[in-house]
Amino acid sequence: MSARRTPTASVLYDAPGPRTRRRIAIASAVTVIVVGAALVLALREFASHGQLDAERWAPFASWPIWSYLLVGLRGTLQAAAVTAVLSAAVGVLLALGRLSRARLVRWPATAYIEVARSLPVLLLIYVTLFGLPRYGIDLPLLWKLVLPLTVANSAAFAEIFRAGILSLPRGQDEAARSLGMSGAQSMRLVVLPQAVRRVTPSVVTQLVSLLKDTSLGYVVAFTELLFRAQVLASYNRLLVQTFLVVTLMYLVVNGLLSALASRLQDASRRRTPTTPDVPLLAAKEIHA
Amino acid sequence: MEALLDNAGPLLQGLLTTLWIAAVSGVGALVLGVLVAAARVSPVPVLRGVAFGYVQLFLNVPLLALLVLFVFALPDVGLLMPLTTTVVVVLVVYEAAYVAEAVRSGVNTVPLGQAEAARALGLTFLQSLRLVVLPQAVRAVVQPLGNVLIALVMNTALAAAVGVVELTSATNKVNLVEAQPIPIFAGAGVLYMLVALTIGLLSGVVERRVAIVR
């Protein structure tokens, strides 16, 4: 099972003999020493500037600070959720558009995807912040963040869904059509459901990236985690502590999402039928 | 259009800064990323664990949070570097995680026989990695690495949020003076698209040159 998961990695080296085991032990020790020394150095640097003092960390053991930061986390999740729903919906439409046979639909969809994928999100945010108000469009704060993020992420979602649709065997669509379904019916009832299921891991990975993007609320002054941290840090002057804590919070939330993505990936790999070139015995072993 | 031409100077200056930051951190990220990928497939469990932790850390923490941490907070512990250098360092360590993921997926595409043959010839692990596996792995992921580099160029824009005057920041400044958002932002957008297009085309050319047909 593990040999199958990382095929090349485990074949890169033999089962270690006594000499290799000794070398591995030495390399492990060296790694531990180097990483440990780096950590000790960093901690000493922290300590020598008084950043490890108990009173600088004590606030983070108190509920008010956490409740303050958790409001920020709620803003992050809210912005991420709205962006995700909108981007996924627009993404499906764009993917269908790019795969359409009608040029009038295909070309604009393709152009939109290609353009939106090669613009920095911050540039889009500056457009909504400083460009649109000039034309009388002043969006509410949440939408100043969500709109640019949706513009960028819908293109990414479109490419993911398109890859999913293209990865499906043609026979699925052909079978649906031969049963008398129209093109739209086949897409809606047969092709899309399978395509979406296939790309679920990529969608979750894109969600991680999207959630990271919401940290641009820092620029928009929307109440999300990073902006909240900045306000907190300018108030309590605990810059190092606040931003380290917030970094950890991002790590935990996104780490959970990433873990979900890799679990989904493993699950879908298990569901895929065994390829014919794998001997039956081995296949049984894998599924055991 | 006039607003754009009148301010071509600052915009091009910004573009140069963007390209410079992207080029330096791109090279750094490629080197560090390959090293991290090598550590992730090494027979040393501790090294694998450290590399895994490294990748997970930078895949899951927003770049902007890291930039803010390094630019505004870490000077408090004595880590004070010039602004652009700080940005480049953060971009290198951040994008190296993506490079490492790309290269690792490339390592998985190298046929088992290659590594087996290398071992059968008596190459040590480091030799087989350096001479046989990694060259083929990197060749297999030229296109994904191109995408990482394009993402890197897009990410240099975040340097604007911590005060570097690169293309996005310069554009914003010009717009605040000229107040003609459409031509100015569109102009900057076209420049970014040209850079992305160039990297895309280049990686296509490089891929055709080095790809191994199996």
Image (cartoon, coloured by chain):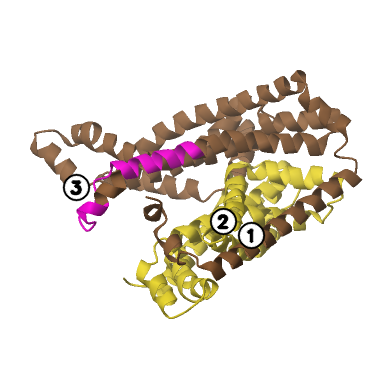
Chain colours: A brown, B yellow
Q: Which residue is mark 2?
A: B45
Q: Chain of mark 3?
A: A
Based on the displayed image, in which of its 4 quarters is residue A3 positioned? bottom left
Q: Amino acid at mark 1?
A: Ser
Residue at 47% over, 49% down: A115
- Determine crowd level at label 3: few under 14, some 14-19, many 20+ residues with C-alpha closer than 10 A: few
- Determine crowd level at label 1: few under 14, some 14-19, many 20+ residues with C-alpha closer than 10 A: some
Left-right relation of A127 to A87: right
Let me know if residue B153 appears in the view.
Answer: no
Mark sitting earlier along the chain (1/3): 1
Q: Which residue is mark 3?
A: A170
Secondary structure beneath dot 3 equals helix
* Residue A274 magenta-highlighted: yes
Based on the displayed image, in which of its 4 quarters is residue B40 positioned? bottom right
Secondary structure beneath dot 2 equals helix
Q: Amino acid at mark 2?
A: Pro
Quadrant including the C terminus of chain B: bottom left
Q: CA distance from mark 1 to mark 3?
A: 50 Å
Q: Is residue B175 above or below residue A228?
A: below
* Residue B15 magenta-highlighted: no
User: What span is colored magenta in the figure?
Assistant: A259-282
Disc on res. A28: 1
Q: Who is closer to the viewer here, A190 or B18?
A: A190
**Percent x, y for residue A69?**
70, 25
Residue at 9% over, 33% down: A180
Q: Chain of mark 1?
A: A
**Percent x, y for residue A272?**
27, 44
Seen as rendered, the residue at the extreme bottom is: B121
Based on the displayed image, in which of its 4 quarters is residue A50 positioned? top right
Q: CA distance from mark 3 to mark 2?
A: 44 Å
Q: Chain of mark 2?
A: B
